[in-house]
Amino acid sequence: MPSFQDEDRAALIDAIEGESAAWVVKDYDRWASFWLQCPAVCHWGWNPVLGVQLLSGWDEISSTFQNAIRAFPEPEPVMVQNIWHHFFMTPDMALVIVDQRGPDLGQLFVEAGLKRELKVLVRDHGRWLHLCIVSLQPAVEGARCPVVRVDSAGQVMWQNTFALEKLANHP
C-alpha cells in the first residue's frame, strides 16, 4: 500500500477546502484554479433539491458554475464542516472521501446537512487539482422533522440537521 506523507495530506486538504471556499463565495477564477481543466473531468451528484446532476468535461462544469453565478451573484460565505474519512494516494493521484456538513441557512450554494463526497485529485506541476467529484446528499437530511439513527444499544449514531437543532436541549 502506498505510504501517505503528512505534507501531501495537508496539500490535499488545502485543495479541497480551497475549492469549496471559492464555490460558496462565487469566486470563479479561484474555484477554477483548483480543477484540472480538461475533457476528462466530471462532477456528478445527487441532492434532494436538484436531483441527479451529471456534468462531464471542463466546458460543461465551468459553464454550469458561471451560469449559477450570473443567476445568483451574491456570495454565501458560510464554511462547511469537513469530516475526513479516507485518503488513498499514489505519487500523482489521490482519492479522498469526506463528509461535509453545512448549516441550514436557506442558501443555494451551501447544501444544508450532511453530504458525502468522493474526490479524485491529480498532481499537476506539483499542485493537487480536482479531476472528479461525486457528491451525494441523503434525502433524510432535507427532512423538516428530526431523523435520528441509533444502534442496537440505543446510542445515537447520526442525526439530521433538524434533529441537531430541535433536540439539542431535549432530556
Image: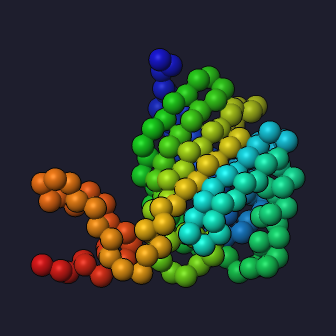
Drawn side of residue 105 relative to residue 126, left or right:
left
The residue under the point 82% across, 66% down is 66
Q: Quadrant of the C terminus?
A: bottom left
Residue 116, percent across and down? 50, 53
Q: Position of residue 151 (x, y in %)?
A: 20, 54
Q: Nearer the viewer, residue 6 or 37?
A: 37
Q: Residue at x 74, y 65 (%)?
A: 27
Front residue (pair 53, 17): 53
Which residue, as the protein is rendered here, is positioned at the far top? 1
Task: Identify whether 171 is placed above or below 50.
Answer: below
Residue at left offset 64%, top offset 48%: 133
Residue 75 % position (x, y): 67, 76
Q: Is residue 164 above or below residue 61?
A: below
Image location (x, y in percent) of residue 123: 69, 32
Q: Quadrant of residue 135?
A: bottom right
Task: Please give left or right for residue 141 compared with residue 146 in the image.
Answer: right
Query: Can residue 113 be seen at all in this image of the molecule?
Result: no
> Could you tell me if residue 25 is visible in this image?
yes
Residue at point 43%, 68% (across, down): 140
Q: In front: 67, or 19?
A: 67
Q: Quadrant location of residue 26?
A: bottom right
- Name the colouring of the figure: rainbow
Total marks placed: 0
Q: Quadrant of residue 120?
A: top right
Horizontal arrangement in the rendering, residue 95 relative to residue 44 (left or right): left
